[in-house]
Amino acid sequence: MTVFETKDALVKALQPYRAKHQSTGFVPTMGALHAGHLSLAARARKENDVVVVSIFVNPTQFNDRNDLANYPRTLQADAEKLQAGGCDFVFAPSVEEMYPEKDTRTFDFGLLDKGMEGTFRAGHFNGVAQIVSKLFDVVQPDRAYFGEKDFQQLAIIRYMAQNLRYPVEIVSCPIVREADGLAMSSRNVRLTPAQRRIVPVIAQTLLASRGKIAHTPLNELKKWVSDTIHQTEGLKMEYFEIVDRNTLQTADTFRSNALQGCIAVHAGNVRLIDNISY
């Protein structure tokens, strides 16, 4: 496995594979890798001839400077995990390499970014689109792999890829959870031991809501989720929405196999997101 810091070096390394029409699988990450990330790389390994994983903490998608400053950076440990998992190339560029000049592009996502994360993280998805499009331009993957934990982001990346006519298949992969149900996240390492004990309530509440949704009005169910989260001292819910899985618009009535419940919760200064299908 080779780690590249420049676009030119990675492009040169990929040229022999492209010349032979071999497929490239790509996993974009911000590092601090956990089993969820590694599951994406493992699927890419099964489905492609060459696997590229990028590790880049993208500044344009952070609307909170403290969150950017505190985001864990563990390149050496990440590279060791990827090598053990059979990754071929790691792309770990500097900010200057990816943004030699300010990226002023703005993207139209229709209504996909108008609620949930889009409401509470202004500019976040535009920054995501900036970096993912830049990475697609460099890697030119046949398939790109994204986790379903970032459900809204996944929909937006699909929309962007289609609009910009990237010839890439966007592959969604299931949420990977800890034994107690907590969705794996790079931010989990910032939880204190006390916080780590209480945050499984998030997933437990979502799972319980699945058993209630068919016979509970959605407004009542959303209130129940909010009340349940706030019964746990130390947790503060930012939002919980039940949306159409395809349009991400707020749903009014239950439709089996068509809805997604999406949540964001603060445990102290750590912001966690999760979701569940209905």
Image: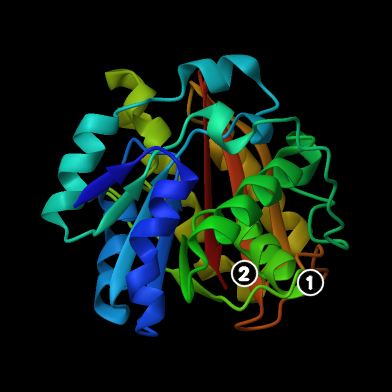
Q: Residue at x 36, y 53 (%)?
A: 53
Residue labelled with disc 1: 163
User: Is 259 displayed left or right of 212 in the figure?
Assistant: right
Q: Nearer the viewer, residue 172 or 246?
A: 172
Colouring of the image: rainbow
Q: Nearer the viewer, mark 1 or mark 2?
A: 1
Secondary structure state at the residue bearing disc 2: helix
Q: Which mark is residue 145?
A: none
Q: Is residue 261 visible?
A: yes
In the image, what residue type sits under mark 2? Ile
- Location of residue 78 (image quadrant): top left
Q: Which mark is residue 213?
A: 2
Q: Residue at x 55, y 53 (%)?
A: 135
In the image, what residue type sits under mark 1? Asn
- Location of residue 31 (image quadrant): top left
State the image coordinates of residue 178 (x, y, percent, origin top left): 27, 49
